[in-house]
Image (cartoon, grey):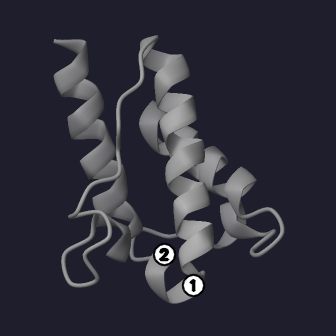
Amino acid sequence: MSDIEDILVKAAGKALSEDLPNFEKIVSPDFNVFESVDSFSVVNILLESESVIENLLGKYVPLANEKTFDAMNSPLLKWQKWIDYVTDIVDAQRK
């Protein structure tokens, strides 16, 4: 598991601690966040993820945008796409 993947799993696990307490055990590369939780929980995942990425990079980096909430194209439709999406953003910020 990559560092970013580990960070995101823990962030989502924390955000979903009440709605999906076993998230860290059930998440898989094909896990669809939109099908599994409500929109409030999606926002919590984004906020928690932004917080841990900010701690990692030392600056705020927004992860939410129109694409993130697009029901047809969101990286949250598959957990692996979310990891890749955030990894690309983090890598770009490190350059």
Residue closest to the eye, 73 or 32: 73
Position of 82 relative to 34 (above/below): above
Q: Is residue 47 left or right of residue 92?
A: right
Q: How many other residues sit within 10 Å of disc 1, few (<14), some (14-19) or many (≥20)?
A: few
Tell me which residue sits at (30%, 63%) in the image: 68
Q: Position of residue 57 (x, y in %)?
A: 42, 15
Mark 2 sits on what residue? Answer: 33
Residue closest to the eye, 65 or 5: 65
Q: Quadrant of residue 27?
A: bottom right
Q: Position of residue 77 (x, y in %)?
A: 34, 76
Mark 1 sits on what residue? Answer: 36
Q: Position of residue 83 (x, y in %)?
A: 36, 51
Position of 2 relative to 32 (above/below): above
Q: Secondary structure at mark 1?
A: helix
Whether residue 48 is visible here, answered yes or no, is: yes
Q: CB atoms at circles 2 and 1 under 8 Å apart?
A: yes
Position of 52 relative to 65 (above/below): above
Residue closest to the eye, 83 or 15: 15
Q: Position of residue 46 (x, y in %)?
A: 49, 52
Mark 2 → mark 1, Cα distance in angstroms = 5 Å
Q: How many other residues sit within 10 Å of disc 2, few (<14), some (14-19) or many (≥20)?
A: many
Disc number placed over residue 87 in the picture, else none = none
